Image: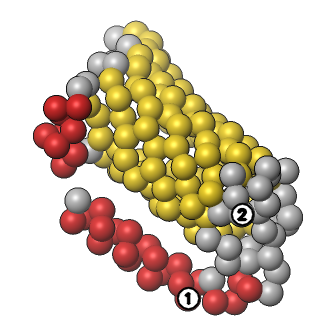
């Protein structure tokens, strides 16, 4: 938990000077706005064996000018020497978006389910921080960092919180 707090504070300290000049143009959210984000990655070795591909998409709905509720779906596929596998996660959550002109820092939390071939089906939850940069009124790039920890029952939450993982995402988004 101390690591996450230090990373969060460091990220906010870095974001503050970056957003000082961002006040010239503003692209505010209004209640009822929707947002779609998409990110992906892939890799393979030099012979194009051992390929892995992952995609994540989210659909958000603005409850107020700042509060966004979302559903996020991630899918990963791996074709390795031993065969192919897939894993996925489906999560819901809320984010608070700060209005700093073209820059929109956010902080929030999510909870959901992970499932697939290589993972025990269980609950995942945790906090998240991120930053959106609007290229124009409707299109943005974003970066996000999530801390997620897994558990099968509520009794496991305290035991598993310190054994979570950080997930980093960079992608594109569209607001309407």
Residue 80 in percent (x, y) is at 41, 18
Mark 1 falls on what kind of element?
helix
Question: Mark on residue 7?
Answer: none
Position of residue 142 in the picture relative to residue 115 (left or right): right
User: Looking at the picture, how far across and down is residue 68, in whole percent?
Assistant: 63, 52
Up-down relation of residue 107 to residue 35 (above or below)? below
Question: Looking at the image, do the residues carrying marks 1 and 2 touch, with CB atoms under 8 Å apart?
Answer: no
In front: label 1 or label 2: 2
Q: Nearer the viewer, residue 171 or 63?
A: 63
For the rendered model, the colour scheme is secondary structure
Does residue 39 appear to the left or right of 138 in the view shown? left
Q: Is residue 135 above or below residue 109?
A: below
Q: Is residue 50 visible?
A: no
Going by the picture, which residue comes out furthest to the left?
159
Residue 10 pos. (x, y %): 38, 76
Q: Residue at x 85, y 50 (%)?
A: 176
**Residue at 43 percent of width and 38 percent of height:** 111
Q: Which residue is mark 1?
A: 17
Can residue 87 be seen? yes
* Residue at x-position 23% and y-position 59%: 1
Q: Secondary structure at mark 2?
A: loop
Q: Nearer the viewer, residue 99 or 45?
A: 99
Please state if 143 lies on the left or on the right of 82 as rendered.
right
Between 73 and 52, the one nearer to me in the picture: 73
Residue 139: x and y in percent read: 80, 57
Left or right placement of residue 45 versus residue 74 in this view: left
Callout 1: 10 Å neighbours few (<14), some, many (20+)?
Answer: few
Would you call the spot at circle 2 few (<14 residues within 10 Å), some (14-19), or many (20 or more)?
some
How far apart marks 1 and 2 lie (CA) works out to 23 Å
- Residue 65: which disc? 2
């Amino acid at each position: 938990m101390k690591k996450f707090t230090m990373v969060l504070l460091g990220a906010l300290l870095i974001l503050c000077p970056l957003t000082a000049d961002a006040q010239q143009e503003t692209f505010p959210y209004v209640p009822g706005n929707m947002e779609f984000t998409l990110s992906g990655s892939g890799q393979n070795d030099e012979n194009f064996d051992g390929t892995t591909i992952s995609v994540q998409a989210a659909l958000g709905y603005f409850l107020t000018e700042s509060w966004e509720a979302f559903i996020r779906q991630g899918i990963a596929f791996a074709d390795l020497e031993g065969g192919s596998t897939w894993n996925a996660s489906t999560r819901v959550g809320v984010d608070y978006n700060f209005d700093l002109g073209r820059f929109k820092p956010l902080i929030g939390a999510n909870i959901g389910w992970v499932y697939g071939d290589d993972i025990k089906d269980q609950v995942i939850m945790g906090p998240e921080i991120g930053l959106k940069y609007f290229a124009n009124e409707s299109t943005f790039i974003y970066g996000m960092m999530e801390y997620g920890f897994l558990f099968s029952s509520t009794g496991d939450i305290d035991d598993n919180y310190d054994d979570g993982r950080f997930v980093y995402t960079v992608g594109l988004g569209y607001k309407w």
